[in-house]
Amino acid sequence: MIFVVLGTHELPFTRLLEEVERLQQSGVITEKIVVQLGHTPYESQSMKLIPFMSYDEMDQNFEEASLIITHAGTGSIITGVKKGKKVIALARRAEFNEHNDDHQVEIVEQFTHAGHILGSDNVGDLENLITREVEGFTPKPYKSGRDHIVKLISEFIETKA
């Protein structure tokens, strides 16, 4: 199963769903597709569309998915990577009224450069990412910097005591 995650941002990300459905109809994608829609209005006879899910439902879909296709929200990306999933992230773009600014382009660039995900700011790249890159891709594990920050704070407190 492929899990498509659009998050909860109030602006729609229809371009991504149109491309996923096109790839399904052309036979590039043959697996079942489950979509967490958020606020994106969309209808499909071939994809299972669910506007919002509980934490447990999201977690179950992340677990069951063979591939995650997501908007470039950090929560969605990190959840997939922490579960060891192959993640393709596509940035919402301000020029298409999908977000207020283009910070998701920067997020995709950073996570892609670090080797955690495959990503692009162009939904037209999705076919190439699925057909040519995802099979041989092994995501690098994500490690939060939280432990390092806690250690630095603890050391600072100890030296001031």
Image (cartoon, rainbow, N blue to C red):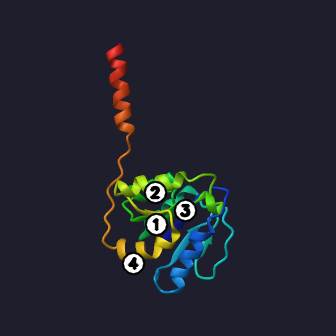
Q: CA distance from mark 3 to mark 4?
A: 28 Å
**Residue 70 visible in the current orientation:** yes
At numbered mark 3, what does the secondary structure look like: helix, strand or loop? helix
**x 32%, y 57%: residue:** 140
Q: CA distance from mark 3 to mark 1?
A: 15 Å
- Residue marked by disc 1: 68
- Residue marked by disc 4: 131
Q: Which mark is in front, 3 or 4? A: 4
Q: In the figure, is residue 32 to the left or right of 116?
A: right
Classify 10 Å Cα crowding around label 4: few (below 14), some (14-19), many (20 and above).
few
Q: Which mark is in front, 4 or 1? A: 4
Q: Quadrant of residue 137?
A: bottom left
- Residue sitting at the far front: 95
Q: Earlier in the sequence, mark 4 or mark 1?
A: 1
Q: Earlier in the sequence, mark 3 or mark 1?
A: 3
- Residue marked by disc 3: 57
Q: Could you say where residue 3 lies in the image, as x and y percent from the top left?
A: 50, 69
Amino acid type at circle 3 is Glu
Q: CA distance from mark 2 to mark 4?
A: 19 Å
Amino acid type at circle 4 is Thr
**x 61%, y 57%: residue:** 94
Q: Which mark is in front, 1 or 2? A: 2
